[in-house]
Image (spheres, coloured by chain):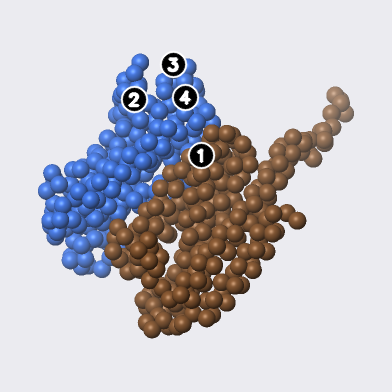
Amino acid sequence: MKPRYALLGLATIGMVYGFSWASRMPGDAVQGESARIISVHVPTAWLAFLAFGMTAVFGIAWLVTKRAKLDHLAAASAEVGVLFTGLALVTGMIWGKATWGIAWDWGDARLASTAMMFFVYLGYLALRRATPDPVQRARRSAVLGAVGALQVPLVYFSVNIWRTLHQTQSVRPDGASLPTETLISMLVNLAAFTVLYLGLLLWRADQLRVEEARLAQTHLTPNAGAAVVPPKLQPGS
Amino acid sequence: MTFRKQAMIILRRDLRIEGRSGEAMFITVPFGLVALFLIPLALPLNTELLSTIGPGMFWVVTLLFGMFITFRQSAAESSAQKEQLRMLGVDPAARFTGRAAASAMLLLVFELIVAPAMIVLFAPAAVPGWLAVTPLAILAAAGLAVIGTLAADLTASLRTRSALAPLLVAPLSVPLLVPAAQGLESIRTKNGILIPALFMVAVVLAVAVIGVVTAQPLEETT
């Protein structure tokens, strides 16, 4: 069995276990049932940070070694990151609507900076699509991946730098400010989502490798129309 | 030739080309002023509201139209020009530095023209002193210039360059725009601009270092 299937299976089991803990969470006195969304929201946000960090790492490694596999891993990581940033934004908005009464608050630094990070990596994917040459694509996206990663610490620490609506980190070095069931559910899902990331990363990187090989093959074979030659007209006919 | 000398030559070249073509000063600057003029027309007639949003609009116009200054056609080098510079032994990092410095100077001029227009059109409640605003304006111009120059290099020779480059620059400029806006607010509330300015310095340095370090690998692609 390919490792990616094993990883995806393991992630599914982990998520089922994590969600079972989420169902046992006590309803929050202020937030009510909406507090359960933390077991999905935090892991998706964590995965986005991890994915974008790894995009930079794979990109820089590509610049050093020039191994195509690293470029595929960087691209796959960015794609997974964009997907999970989108999910983190949506789950955050659902939670915000239930808790704060509004889905989006422009005054909140975490929301605004996460949205901007999302757009940076949409730009990353757009740059990849717009660059036809594989080496040029890998090189340019590696540089952009390194610049884009500067946003990750900014988004993470935005709640500490600017004291706005979004609460600070729930789990800090000085201890967690969560009930045990909530903490277990969040941590189990954190691990399960990390395994899910690895599975999706390997899967998508493999697809990108096949796509690139197919494209290279297409460029080697002449077009079907090339076999058709226009008839030569005889003088006087 | 030293790195500094090479960068200075590129800077002078870019400014001379701009002086002859006037692309940034005679096209982008008036366009930015028109945008600043249009904003109040799209809002309800409320002087208080306009004076509140004025400084923010100044930064938004600087960001959106400043991008066009960094992507100006006269700053785009053809493959032949790049080949020539390479044969002359010009360091790609010096080329990046010189181009970014030229864009930063043009952006600063853009800010100098747009800021009085904003004060006249929006009449902000408290007009901060020039001395206090100068560091923020310089840092914003420098930051936008390095990000724009890097984006121009990343999208060089692509068919979708004109749309793609702004898509890269706009979100990457947010770490500059937010502290710049906060800095103006801090001046108004007399809290000092040290923290926002230091934040902007960190962003400018980080992007400049990445731009200089990756200038050589990016040069190989085009």
Q: Colour of chain B?
A: blue
- The three-letter amino acid code for the residue at tag 2 is Ala
Q: Chain of mark 3?
A: B
Chain A shade: brown
Q: Secondary structure at mark 1?
A: helix
Judge if badges 4 and 2 mark residues of a common chain: yes
Which of the 4 image quarters holds residue A235?
A: top right
Labels 4 and 3: the sequence-earlier one: 4
Q: Chain of mark 4?
A: B
Q: Which amino acid, by three-letter code, is at mark 4?
A: Lys
Q: Nearer the viewer, residue A191 or A101?
A: A191
Residue hosting label 2: B7
Viewer-nearest of labels 4 and 2?
Answer: 2
Q: Secondary structure at mark 2?
A: helix
Type of amino acid under label 1? Ile
Q: Which residue is mark 4?
A: B82
Mark 1 against mark 3, which lies toward the viewer? 1
Parent chain of label 2: B
Give the distance between the C-alpha atoms of the residues marked 4 and 2, in whole angstroms.
15 Å
Note whether residue B31 is visible.
Answer: no
Q: Are marks 1 and 2 on the same chain?
A: no
Cα–Cα gap, marks 1 and 2: 26 Å
Residue matched to label 3: B88
Q: Which quarter of the image is occupied by the N terminus of chain B?
A: top left
Residue at 74%, 35% (x, y): give it.
Answer: A220
In contact (CB < 8 Å): disc 4 and disc 3: no
Q: Residue at x 84, y 32 (%)?
A: A231
Helix, strand or loop at label 4? It is: helix
Q: Is residue B70 above or below residue A178?
A: above
- Residue A50 horizontal side relative to residue B190, left or right: right
